[in-house]
Image (tube, rainbow, N blue to C red):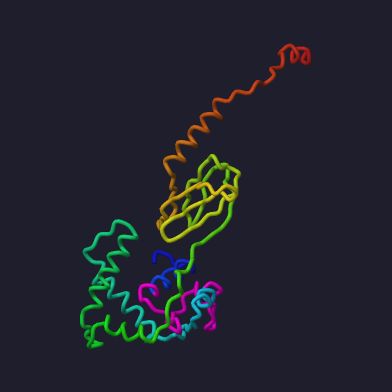
Amino acid sequence: MFSKEAEDLLWGIARCLWSFGGLPATLVWDREGSLHAGGGRPTDAMAALCGQLKSDWYFCEARDPQAKGAVEKLQQYLETNFEPGRAFANPLDFQLQLDAWFEKANARTHRSLRCRPIDRLAEELSAMRALPGRELDLDRRFVMRVPPDPYLRFDTNDYSLDPGFVSRRVEVRVSQQRVTATVLDTGEIAASHERSFAKHRTITALEHARALKVLRGERRGFEVDVEQRSLAVYDALLA
């Protein structure tokens, strides 16, 4: 994950579950701020996910280095065995390479387990419940009106909107891959961009830039007749 926002973390949890192919009775998590509301209670977003999955939750106790270490050890293993010497074209390429690496690593005999993790997973799946019939929809959605400067801001980045829809209301949908905007009353697409996880970027579609240039050129070329007062009037007042 490239974000610690609740929606992104929950998407990551759901992706892991669908990769496993089964649903555990309890989701165990450390005390991540966007998921843990304090006192072992989940945030509304985490509770909603567990409600949809019909799974319980458990947050590790504070100052529990053993539980935290189990998570951090895997992270360290990725940083020292997977990332060195690799190049990634984009976040999707990173994920695809990581998935392939996990398949290879889990098929090897684990020194501590003295078995292949893929065989242990098969045992776990026999005790897990079936996944829901379809994957969860965890995209962000909000409605906005296209401003005169046709851009929408999400997570510090500005994404261009079609300037032809200025003042129209659009529904913005943000997934892990794309940021799209749809005009509410007609269903027309006002924007469709690849989501950027970098910060403070301005992402402008070529067709939006061209349309905005044409509109601004038309406004500059629009002449308004303004009445000119005769200078004799001022001469009479000063006389």
Q: Residue at x 69, y 17 (%)?
A: 228
In this orientation, which residue lies closer to the viewer: 130 or 183? Answer: 130
Where does the magenta region start and end? 17-45
In this orientation, which residue lies closer to the viewer: 196 or 140? Answer: 140
Residue 236 against residue 185 in the figure, above or below: above
Residue 35 against residue 122 in the figure, above or below: above
Q: Residue at x 52, y 75 (%)?
A: 52
Magenta span includes 31 = yes
In the figure, is residue 58 to the left or right of 104? right
In the figure, is residue 211 to the left or right of 65? right
Q: Which corner quadrant holds the N terminus?
A: bottom left
In the figure, is residue 98 to the left or right of 186? left
Q: Residue at x 44, y 80 (%)?
A: 29
Magenta span includes 179 = no
Q: Position of residue 42 (x, y in %)?
A: 53, 78
Q: Position of residue 167 (x, y in %)?
A: 60, 44
In this orientation, which residue lies closer to the viewer: 55 or 130? Answer: 130
Q: Position of residue 178 (x, y in %)?
A: 43, 55
In this orientation, which residue lies closer to the viewer: 75 or 54? Answer: 54
Q: Position of residue 50 (x, y in %)?
A: 50, 77
